[in-house]
Amino acid sequence: MRPPAALVLALALLAAPGVPAAESAAGSSELDQLMQLLAQRRHGRVSFTEVQHLAVLDQPLRSSGELLYDAPDRLEKRTLQPKPEDLVLDHGTLIMQRGTHRRVLSLSDTPQAVPLVESVRATLAGDRKALEQYFALHLSGSLESWTLELIPRDATLRRSIEHIRIGGEHDAIRTVEIIQRDGDSSLLSIGPELRP
C-alpha cells in the first residue's frame, strides 16, 4: 500500500471547491468567499488521474479511478487502474482495501495523519478555522482560476511535507499537488463531475 501521506492526500481529489485571489490573511474576503463556496458542496463524484514521483522508483506511478465525497467527512478514492484499490475516510476511520487485503486505521491512533486528513476534510467542508489550525494558507488567482497553498504549521509535519497546493475553478477542485521534503511528489488531476 502507498505511504499514508500519499493515501490521505489522494483523498483530496474528491474536492470540488473554489478560491479567489491574493495571499490569505485573517479576515481575507477572498478566502472567506472560497470557504463559503466549498461549504455549499455537499456531494461529489469525479474521475481522477494521479502521478506519483518517488525517488526509489525509476518511473512515476500512474493510477486512475473515481473520487466520491459526502459532507462533512466521508471521502472515497476508488482506484481502477492499474490495480483496483479502495480508500475510504469515514468519521475518523481510514479503511484501505486492495484485493483481499484490508487495513483499518483510526485517526485517533495515528495523530501524525490528522493534519493531512484535515487538509482534505476542512477544505471540502469550507472550514477555514480547522485549516488554519494546521496550515498557513496562501491564496492566489481569481475565482475563475485559483490556487490555495497549505504550508504546515507543525514542525513534525514540516519535516515530511513541504506544502500542499490545491488548484481549481469556482467551486471545483482540479488539482491536488503534494510536495514532500525528500523530493517525492504526487499530482492528482480531477475530471468533471460524473453522473451516478
Image (cartoon, rainbow, N blue to C red):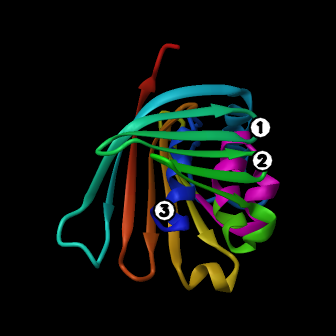
Magenta range is 117-138
Nearest to the eye among marks 2 and 3: give it.
3
Label of residue 72 in the image: 1
Crowd class of label 3 (few under 14; some 14 to 19; many from 20; radius 10 Å):
some
Who is closer to the viewer here, 130 or 65?
Answer: 65
Secondary structure under tag 3 reads helix
Indicate the quadrant where residue 157 lies.
bottom right
Q: Closer to the N terminus: mark 1 or mark 2?
A: 1
Asked if the magenta segment contains residue 123, the reply would be yes
Crowd class of label 2 (few under 14; some 14 to 19; many from 20; radius 10 Å):
some
| Residue on which the image places disc 3 | 6
Which amino acid does the dot numbered 1 rest on?
Answer: Pro
Residue 38 higher or lower than 196, as above or below: below
Q: CA distance from mark 2 to mark 3?
A: 22 Å
Asked if the magenta segment contains residue 58, the reply would be no
Q: Is residue 96 left or right of residue 36?
A: left
Residue 26: x and y in percent read 78, 60
Q: Which quadrant of the figure contains the N terminus?
A: bottom left
Disc 2, disc 3: CB below 8 Å? no
Secondary structure under tag 1 reads loop
Q: Is residue 59 left or right of residue 151?
A: left
Residue 17 higher or lower than 152, as above or below: above
Q: CA distance from mark 1 to mark 3?
A: 21 Å
Q: Which residue is at a point 58% across and 39% down the rendered structure image?
A: 76
Which amino acid does the dot numbered 3 rest on?
Answer: Ala
Secondary structure under tag 2 reads loop
Who is closer to the viewer here, 138 or 131?
Answer: 131
Residue 180: x and y in percent read 45, 74
Nearest to the eye among marks 1 and 3: give it.
3
Q: Is residue 127 left or right of residue 58?
A: right
| Residue on which the image places disc 2 | 127
